[in-house]
Amino acid sequence: MQTNKLRIFTYSLGLLLIVALLSACGNRFEGQLRDAHKNAQSSLAYLKDQLDARGLSNALLIDKYASALIQQKPDYRDIATLLKKEATSQGKAYTTLNQRLMAVSLTPTNTETASSGLQELQLINSAADVYEFNNGLADVVNTLASLSDGQLAVINVPASQRASAQQANALVGNPAYGSWTQGSSGQSFWAWYGMYSMFSNVFGMNRYNYSSWSSRPHYSYYGNYGRNRWGSNADVAQNQNLSKRYPSRYNKPSAATNARYATTAKRSSRYGGTSSKSSSKSSSSRYSSYGSSSRSSSYSGSRSFRSGK
């Protein structure tokens, strides 16, 4: 009888130790997640202030292009007005980042969930960088330009791809505006979200089929750069899988894409040991601190472009 009691006591003590260890681990991760969440939240708040204050150059260009397109083509007023919204904190470019932030769990149940959450918060923080976000808005500017029959020039596009960019929708492939969906035929096509379905009529086609779409050159900041820098792991993985399923000379994954995909596929607990406090920046110094890293991603005529699909 004493032996049984001793075994029960030892077993119970072991369970208590395991629970205590798991709780300590969870609390450690929760603290890091809270810190990373505050950083991302602060970056998004600062970005909102800059958008509301009309402080982003490409946001101002969106306004200018939208107004010019309405004058040129009054029938395009609805789509131009919709794209003009992207220059504000009410646009999909900004609100999608907030949705990603709200989706991150701050109470992880295991190491994998915690590391995934920390990575996502770091990616959101990168996406909320004012200069990076401004670069991403170039896709909206260029979509407006593509509707103008050459009257409005595309911006920040390598010379070899300007002609195709002038005729393409730079927002295709960006998960803020739609998604690649597999139809009953097994083919993947682009399905716009909500009001953006207007593009189906404006661009003269009901669907963008991935196979035919990916077989032509189509430049976008998100597709060539943004996805690898701050896109979600789910979008990186889907893009990698689609590229393998429908290979073409224009959608070959770059070294940066392969590296990002490998990191995503082999996610480990290494993020658990990284303190998010080191990435904290005060709002007053954001422009100077981000400038050195983010300005390098801004385009100039002398920059050498690399595919980042």
Image (tube, rainbow, N blue to C red):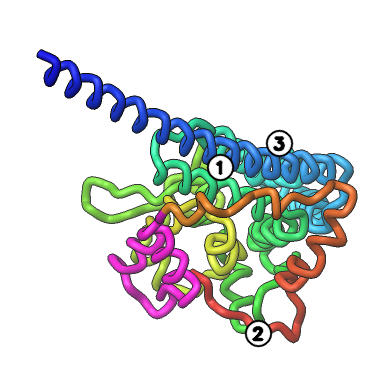
Q: Earlier in the sequence, mark 2 or mark 1?
A: 1
Disc 2 on helix, strand or loop? loop
Whether 249 is among the magenta residues is yes
Q: Earlier in the sequence, mark 1 or mark 3?
A: 3
Residue stretch in magenta:
239-268
Residue pointed to by mark 1: 196
Classify 10 Å Cα crowding around label 1: few (below 14), some (14-19), many (20 and above): some
Q: Amino acid at mark 3?
A: Gln
Q: Amino acid at mark 2?
A: Ser
Q: Nearer the viewer, residue 132 or 206?
A: 132
Camera-nearest label, 2 or 1: 2
Which quadrant of the structure image shows residue 53? top right
Classify 10 Å Cα crowding around label 3: few (below 14), some (14-19), many (20 and above): some
Task: Residue at 36% x, 76% y: name it.
Answer: 248
Q: Amino acid at mark 1?
A: Tyr
Residue 182 appears in the picture as rendered: yes
